[in-house]
Amino acid sequence: MRTALLADIHSNLEALQACLAHARREGVDRFAFLGDLIGYGADPLACLDIIAGLVDAGAPAVLGNHDEACLGGQLDAMHFAARDAIYWTRERLGPHERAFLAGLPLAVAETDRLLVHASAERPEAWTYITGPREAAQAFAATPARVVLVGHVHHPQLYFTMPGGAIRDFAPVPGVPLPLSDFRRWLAIVGSVGQPRDGNPAACYALHDAGAGTLTHFRVPYDVQAAARKILDAGLPERLAWRLLEGE
Amino acid sequence: MSLGEGPLPAGTAVGGFRIRGLLHEGGMARLYAVDAADAAAPAPFPLLMKVPKLGFGCHPGCLVGFEVERMILGRLRGPHAPALVASGDEEGAPWLVMERIEGEALADRAARAPLEAGEVARLTGAVAAAVHDLHRQNVIHFDLKPANVLFRADGTAVPIDFGLARHGELPDLVEEEFALPAGTGATISPEQLAGNRRDPRSDLFALGVIAYQLATGKLPFGAPTTRGGMRRRLYIDPPPPRALKPGLPPWLQEVILRCLEVRPQARYATAAQLAHDLAHPEQIPLSLRAGRLHRAGPLAVARRWLRALRAPPRAAPTPALHLSRAPHVLVAIDPGDRREALDEAMRTALRRALAAEPDLRLTLLAALPPQPFGEESAPDIAHGQQTAARIGLRHWAHPLGLSAEQLRIHVEENADAAGALLDYAAAHHVDRIVIGARGHSALRRYLGSVSARVVAEAACSVSVVRPPQDHP
């Protein structure tokens, strides 16, 4: 079973379409969505339409903090640009989209892997996994051997050593990493719609359960079009130029 | 009984294979000869199954070597690594099946050392070619020794046991796994001892130990088992091979001691350069290393001891990147077409390459047309012409200001210049060919373009250089 893992799409239709097309060319069997489907970008409805269609067809999807924020509540924890984008998005969501988001689970467990937006440890706390310490907490909170997450917009890999220590590794795009059975693995799959590692190309990962490999991919897409739509929509300018820079 | 706990009897079926018999029992794993269980679909080569030992007293790190080998073999292609056929596990006990190399082991040759210099060069050169192929595929072996090298029937060397290896684009599962730096006491490199597992030139150090052992029958640093014992090689040099074996040619001592340099940047930049030199020993420039008959005195040892306290220099992030800075560039010089403008344009192209790839090696090649002289004087005349051509080529390269180490010259009598270039490039791991565009003489048009054929048939990149005034 080959699954394309897409996280942090953030209403970026151009990036989403480019990644879906790339994954189909790679011959994936299914898609999985690791949260933050909307917020930041100018195409929340079009993105949700595509994703809801795939979810209806059996693709698993989990809730992200931006998705949750679009349903209501206080936004104290967010910076201004993110907050403005949430208010803008809230006005555009209809009852249909709200019902879809409200129905998303915080985590999905399948055989030996777990799909979650932020951390397996209290997913609703939206903890950022920025180092081995947070990765260890996530491992401790789940029996899953492979944990697949988004939230942090840099692709990264954490794995356990036989003594229990945790090491990290920066994956090389396009290189399949063997996820050996003797260890546990936590992969941050990178962001489709708002990469922040200096590379503006969209990022997603492919988990091949049969071969036991995980591959990160970088997919170039029409960044200018996505950025122009953000400006035209009256969303904060910063959200447009950070797409161009990948920051 | 679980798979890894004890030896399996012949006939046992494991994951689509049938055990034929135990071949070898090591400290970490058992090796079995196996057949594909489906007799209708036999494997194209003999098979070997590796089963790590499990059970009471097994260190958790014991599986790491097995895991690393499975990961690395899964990525390696070509004749210089055993093919990985399948892997799996049965009730938590892992196994893998790979190609069984049936040829001779380098250890058998090492047992008969000291060997004659030509034999040492041939064997070490074959292993160096294999190591270069691993490096090209982004893998550093880190545990080369005679016991870990086998030969196919055609003489192709195949390093085995990739349990300590590293792939430049995959997580390093060995790093920090062991309290002692991972390696074998006899062959471990100085930078491995300092915890640096990124430098492909660590394998060149091990090649130096192997060549030393084949040439003298002795280990240059013994086989220490403690960290302190291994660290002595950072400041105490080995006895020069010629002190142990006075008949050993100076060029072989030069090559061996260069591989055994403490600082990686003082060794050969690539295993391909080492293999190239071993194939052309007459061209190896001899330094003070070649004549040394004694170890360095206490003052030098003290100086090195102090230097050893410093951290080793950083290596390139991946073996493939390291190789990209040390290409072998083959320059085709046409003795029949000497245009100053073309020469200068070619040297300009090479100067640019030297600025970007400081460790590159240049080989200038000239193919001389065979001479139709009478039989008796022919060898003398040909020899004279080749010597003149060599002098001419050296003079051609002089404005580039190359070190003796960077420049090699190859002159051969061959009417087929393109064929000579292509053969040399294929035999000596050439990464790029630089060739001048043909001139406008009617004869050249009649003979056809050497550069066009080289561009069409070479396995590597080809730069065709044209002097400015050739443009309309």
Image (tube, coloured by chain):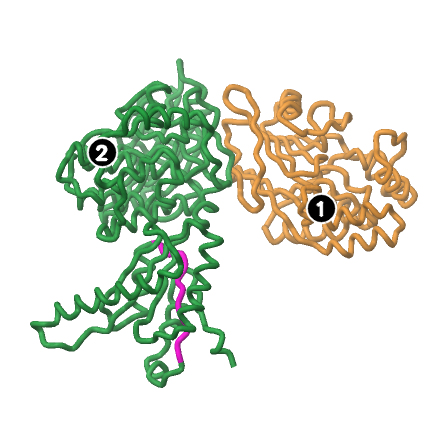
Q: Residues within 10 Å of mark 2 (few under 14, many from 20)?
A: many
Which range of residues does the magenta coloring cover?
B429-439
Q: Residues within 10 Å of mark 1 (few under 14, many from 20)?
A: some
Q: Quick one: A75 or B298, which is closer to the camera?
A: B298
The residue labelled by disc 1 is A246
Rendered view: A32 above or below B63: below
Task: Look at the image and give the colour of chain A.
Answer: orange
Subunit of label 2: B
Q: Secondary structure at mark 1?
A: loop
User: Which quadrant of the structure image shows residue A160?
Assistant: top right
Q: Residue at x 13, y 77 (%)?
A: B373
| Residue B22 visible in the snapshot | no
Q: Quick one: B451 or B80, which is closer to the camera?
A: B451
Q: Quick one: B32 or A78, which is closer to the camera?
A: A78
Residue furthest bottom as drawn: B442
Q: Quick one: B296 or B44, which is closer to the camera?
A: B296
User: Which quadrant of the structure image shows residue A37?
Assistant: top right
Disc marking residue B240: 2
